[in-house]
Amino acid sequence: MIRRPPRSTLSSSSAASDVYKRQFIIPFKSMLKIIKYFLMLSKDPKTYKWASIGLLALVCDLTLYKYLLAKIDMDAAKAASTFLGVNISFHFNRLWTFKSIGRYFDDLKRYLALYIIAILVNVVVNNFAFKIFQDIDLAYFIALCVSVIIGYFGQRIWVFKNRLK
């Protein structure tokens, strides 16, 4: 609940008015931090490398998905194509984008944990979006967007965070 200064307090320098101002400034400062973070990401070469690899993974993912749709169930096709895409993403990002100094199997364990969650979320979102929109392409891209968000921040913050021993 936002507290407002009493009506009898018209002075902009009153204590009640200061409380009101602080309630506005705190969320504003948080928004500025978020904006600064996204600006920092937009200037980081890792973001563009990750996006390039993401496009390659997307093309492979979509191609396999369309191919498998004619042969197997939609959910299985989605899981298989996503698994291919995230494998491409893992190996190229580990070596090129994030230049991980972590041990391969440690990175792989974190990656597998991240992408088991991402694949499950992707399949659920794909299925849910298809039920709502009845458009398989739109459902695919909605699920893909969710996976991209999970994948980028998961890889950047957790999987390939270079840890010093």
Image (tube, rainbow, N blue to C red):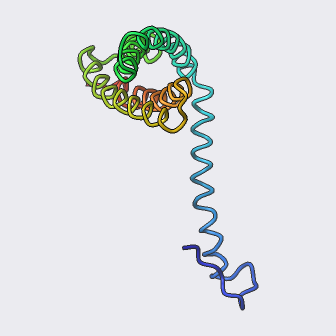
Residue in view at x 28 percent, y 18 percent: 108
Residue 82 at x, y = what percent?
A: 40, 19
Using the rendered view, name the quadrant where residue 102 is placed: top left
Quadrant including the C terminus:
top left
Instruction: Name the residue nearer the viewer: 136 or 29.
Output: 136
> Is 147 situated left or right of 19 in this image?
left
Q: Is residue 24 above or below residue 130?
A: below
* Residue at 43% across, 27% down: 151
Task: Examine the image and state in which quarter residue 74 appears.
Answer: top left
Identify the residue shown where x is 51% and y is 17%: 54
- Residue 93 position, x and y percent, is 43, 15
Describe residue 164's horizontal placement relative to residue 42 as left or right.
Answer: left
Tell me if residue 89 comes above or below residue 165 in the rendering: above
Residue 3's place in the image compared with 111, above or below, is: below
Q: Which residue appears at 38% of the width and 34% of the height?
A: 124
Quarter of the figure that contains the N terminus: bottom right
**Residue 87 at what x, y percent from top left?**
37, 13
Q: Is residue 107 left or right of residue 123?
A: left
The image shows residue 70 at horizontal and vertical percentages of 43, 11
Judge whether 21 appears above or below 116 on screen. below
> Left or right: 13 with respect to 132?
right
How many marks overall? 0
Quarter of the image for residue 125 reads top left
